[in-house]
Amino acid sequence: GAARGGAMGDEYWLVAAKNEGAPGEEAARATFEALRREMSGLADCHRFEIPELRVGTLEKLMAAGDLLNKVDLNVEAALRKIERTFEELKSGGLGENAKLGVNQ
């Protein structure tokens, strides 16, 4: 897709291209040079590297995201219970100036 940035009216495009031939640095360089030649006079082309992901990185990230969601739900439930308990105690005679704290 295109993104606007820089000077007014500038447009930037991110293009992913499959390597010509075997995978590897030489094939990637050849693919980029072919793209640069085709775009000559139409656009400036700049190459940037995307690092290889280690095996299991995505799976670990997904598992961590799931765990974070579970923990978030448990913490929210505990806080809601504390809030309800405080409101019940306050309405039960502690008064408007009641404070909830540890060891009080």
Image (cartoon, grey):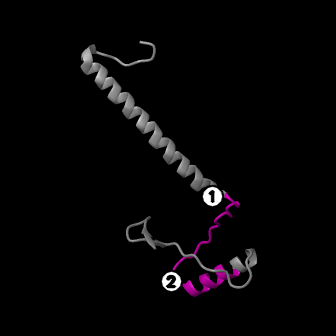
Q: Is residue 54 above or below residue 80?
A: below
**What x and y, as percent, mark residue 99?**
34, 17
First in residue order: circle 2 vs circle 1:
2
Task: Please name whichever residue, 51 or 98, is drawn nearer the observer in this view of the structure.
Answer: 98
- The vertical placement of 78 against 42, above or below, is above
The foreground one among 59 and 2 is: 59
Is residue 40 in view from this perspective? Answer: no
Q: Where on the picture, by quarter, is residue 55?
A: bottom right
Quadrant position of residue 59: bottom right
What secondary structure is marked by label 1? Answer: helix
Residue stretch rendered in magenta on the structure: 30-56
Q: Residue at x 26, y 18 (%)?
A: 92
Residue designated by label 2: 42
Mark 1 sits on what residue?
59
* Quadrant of the rendering where the C terminus is positioned: top left
Q: Is residue 78 magenta?
A: no
In percent of the image, x 33 and y 24: which residue is there?
A: 86
| Residue 21 in the image: above or below residue 102 | below
Residue 15 image point, x, y percent: 54, 76
The crowding category of the residue bearing disc 2, from other C-alpha atoms within 10 Å (few below 14, some 14 to 19, many at least 20), is: few
Q: Residue at 46% of width from left, 37% of height from top?
A: 75
Query: Which kind of residue does numbered mark 2 sit on?
Result: Leu
Q: Residue at x 37, y 34 (%)?
A: 80
* Alpha carbon separation for disc pair 2 and 1: 41 Å
Q: Are marks 2 and 1 in contact (CB under 8 Å)?
A: no
Main secondary structure of the magenta stretch = loop
The stretch drawn in magenta includes residue 42: yes
Q: Quadrant of residue 27?
A: bottom right
Q: Amino acid at mark 1?
A: Glu
79 relative to 23 in the view: left or right: left
| Marker count (numbered) | 2
| Side of 99 where 37 appears, left or right | right
